[in-house]
Image (cartoon, rainbow, N blue to C red):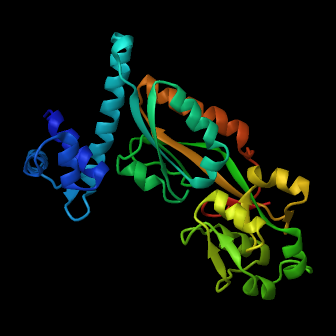
Amino acid sequence: MGFDRQQLETLAAVVELRHFGRAASALNITRGAVSQRINALEESLGTPLLVRDGAVPTPAGEALLRHIQVLRTLESDTLKQIKPEASERTRVAIAVNADSLATWFEPVACAIAKEEFVLELIVEDQDHTLPILSRGEAMGCVSTQSSAPIGFVAEPIGAMEYECVARPAFAQTHFAHGLGLHNILAVPAVLFNRKDGLHALFLEHLLGFPVSGYATHYFPSPTALLAAIRAGVGYGLVPSLQVQALKESGDLVALAPRRKILVDLYWHHWEVAPPNARAISEIVMYHARRSLFQLSSASSDKGEEGAAGI
């Protein structure tokens, strides 16, 4: 059977805008027409595609949204080959974690945007970008997960290196004798958000057992988190790419220089992709393998989520 393109684009609009009314406005049709198209598509396939409360796609809806993403990208690439002067920029969405965007992925995004693309970056925790890809909301994502969804490939691109840092005066006041359990429980740590499990992983590697109950500040942007540490609010884990110059200048010190954390990252992309989508993957891979820590096959022991202390 073939798909009705209007119905497909209506489904995509509802999911992208998370609302039937907003989708109707974007498509310049009535809300009733939106519902009719979605209902007709579901009837033709014999399965629900959307959970109406929240406009969240079902597994079948996610599969169809991935098809729509591929279709849009392929059509744009074909049109560019046939009539380059009249073709529009290809709309692409990529899911990426904030730390990557603040460091190595920024030049990647700029390089992609300078090509014939209209780019949307969806920022999420590195352990939670994959569902965005699975839902068909992005054509690629940076993730800590090594297993790719059906129809995608997960390529290792290297590891983000993190180290625990603080202001020199803060370190002298609170950790003059090192990072001991008593001080860890008493001194506030600075984390990205409640999903951030990196600090807990670092403490477990450091002490040899899980630790909880320590005071925590949340600063949900890499810039704000680093600024909080520099202001003496607390101590925390920051990408080495961000703090190298600050350590060299003496603005920050490493609290456990031999206990850095590596977080393996993977670039998830379509298994079968048109040339313009493959070009994006090539840009990502090029920059990642020149900026990220490259682990050899005989690298140190890794944790279950791809992170290792070194």
Query: Image quadrant for the C terminus?
Result: bottom right
Looking at the image, which residue sits at the far front? Answer: 231
Question: 83 above or below 110?
Answer: above
Write the residue at 86% across / 60% down. 251
Write the residue at 9% across / 44% down. 44
Question: 134 above or below 204?
Answer: above
Question: 203 above or below 2?
Answer: below
| Residue 306 visible in this rendered orientation of the protein | no
Q: Quadrant of residue 191?
A: bottom right
Q: Nearer the viewer, residue 204 or 10?
A: 10
Q: Going by the image, does 94 lie left or right of 103?
A: left
Give the number of callouts.
0
Q: Going by the image, does 77 lie left or right of 206?
A: left
Write the residue at 34% across / 11% down. 83
Residue 250 screen position, x and y as percent: 90, 59
Q: Quadrant of residue 172?
A: bottom right
Q: Going by the image, does 74 lie left or right of 173?
A: left
Residue 263 screen position, x and y as percent: 66, 56
Query: Image quadrant for the N terminus?
Result: top left
Q: Quadrant of residue 81?
A: top left
Q: Going by the image, does 19 lie left or right of 230?
A: left
Residue 109 screen position, x and y as percent: 56, 37
| Residue 27 visible in this rendered orientation of the protein | yes
Q: Nearer the viewer, residue 114 or 211?
A: 114
Question: 244 above or below 190?
Answer: above
Residue 57 screen position, x and y as percent: 27, 55
Write the residue at 68% across / 84% down. 214
